[in-house]
Amino acid sequence: MTAATMAAGFDFIAVLPEIVLAASACAILIADLFISDAHRQVSYWLTQFGLLATAGLALQLFHDGAPLHALGGMFVADQLASVLKIFSCVAVSLMLFYSRSYLMARGLFRGETFVLALTSLLGMLVMISANSFVSLYLGLELMSLSLYAMVALQRDSERAIEAAMKYFVLGALASGLLLYGMSMIYGATGTLDIGGAAEAMVHGHPNRTILLFGLVFVVSAIAFKLGAVPYHMWVPDVYDGAPTAVTMFIGTAPEFAAFAFAMRLLVGTMSAFTVEWQGMLLVLSLLSMILGNVVAVAQTSIKRMLAYSTIANMGFMLMGLLAANNDGYSAAMFYIVTYVLTALVAFGIVLLLSRQGFEADQLDDFKGLNQRSPWYAFMMLLTMFSLAGVPPTIGFYAKFSVIWAAVDIGLVWLAVIAVLASLVGAFYYLRIVKLMYFDDAVDRERIEARADTRFLLSVNGLALLLLGIFPQKLMGWCALALTHSY
């Protein structure tokens, strides 16, 4: 076998998960033309099969170990990428399982929903494996454009259309900031390659002022995608206006892509400016934790409350990133994984309580849930405890790991503020528990759920407890992925 043939083979293997996912989306798009509304299950199961195959290929690349480069160095398949791709596929798959009845009741159980979910996921996977500014931007736009369309899927809903417009306009602004920042970095370093730009900053003599301006724009774009303050204004409106299934999608899988986005640009490219971006992330983290938790207290909508909860949790995650060491990075990755697993259960319960003609999007809709279904009330209790950081749920160890990362670099005062912010957050999380267990039920409608939804939601909820008791395996997986990638 010649060197050229081997290189071509490596190219193919490195991008195989993305090829399979893109082929699945195309196959569903074509097959859906010939499938009647009564047989949409075929499109649904084809989507699930595509997600399973993509996750399986990513898992194989993780076991192979050594990073593979493809597409002229624009794409890298390392262990960090493999782990994040697996979790992204799992999150999208669970979202589709949990929202199946919800989508059917609202006429959204159709091919375009599945295709948009897959194309958005494809953009996330490209972002996760991006090794060039070009591939990073292409992945970001593919993900974002699909998300804008998904928010507007419910065409007869004025709230959904308004949310989609806000998301589109503000997303375009963030994309412009990112492009402007990357163009400055390219102008100063002379390369679009992430590793090449980092090397040029260390060994070359680029214009430091231009790079600092570029860094500011890049961090702003990262903050927007994470929903960090003061770039958070789109999060509550989009969460509240989008169909709950789409809100669940936006609040879970894209968080992995945003984390990879931050790692590739800040750690992979701007490592020579660590002190500068540490200071920026410090401000973003502090503002997000405080504002997210304080404003969430005043919310009466569960979706808006979870939106501000997301903002606050991204502030905690940034505490790990700003530590700028492997322990901090692995703590941040562990935090993002545990947050997504928790958010899946929270939105899954909201979807269960919703039915045709009724959206369970108010806090009062949780009153007396223990009387209607003690098991689902227990699942929601575990979720709220995990988000609040109550032991022995996984959320406690996630918060502890990022707070310890801040203490480890001497930011004790930030750790103290984080603990106080957690106490504020505990108030509105435990308020849900109080409504479920100590208030009388307003709605006594029987909760209907498919057997697969009940089973997966129960496994997902119990995982928050079991992973909290035995967190070492997941922590070790995150540390291993980052050790071999950075």
Image (cartoon, rainbow, N blue to C red):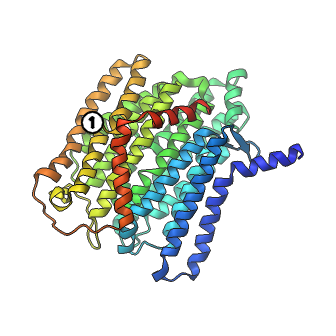
Label 1: how many Cα within 10 Å (few below 14, some 14–19, many 20+): some
Q: Secondary structure at mark 1?
A: loop
| Residue 258 can be seen, yes or no | yes
Residue occupying image coordinates x 59% and y 76%? 31
Instruction: Identify the image quadrant of residue 400.
Output: top left
| Residue 140 can be seen, yes or no | no
Q: Which amino acid lies under the numbered mark 1 shown in the image of this protein?
A: Val
Question: Which of 457 and 227 lies nearest the eye of the viewer?
Answer: 457
Give the answer, above or below, for where 410 lies relative to 84: above
Residue occupying image coordinates x 37% and y 62%? 453
Q: Position of residue 22 (x, y in %)?
A: 63, 61
Q: Tell which residue pokes out farthest to the top in this image.
A: 410
> Left of 108 or right of it: where is 124?
right
Give the answer, above or below, for where 387 lies relative to 104: above
Q: Tell which residue pokes out farthest to the right in this image.
A: 2
The residue labelled by disc 1 is: 390
Residue occupying image coordinates x 36% and y 33%? 397
Instruction: Identify the image quadrant of residue 107.
Output: bottom left
Question: Which of 39 and 73 lies nearest the eye of the viewer?
Answer: 39
Instruction: Identify the image quadrant of residue 316.
Output: top left
> Left of 400 or right of it: where is 169?
right
Question: Which of 329 and 479 lies nearest the eye of the viewer?
Answer: 479
Question: Which of 44 and 427 lies nearest the eye of the viewer?
Answer: 44
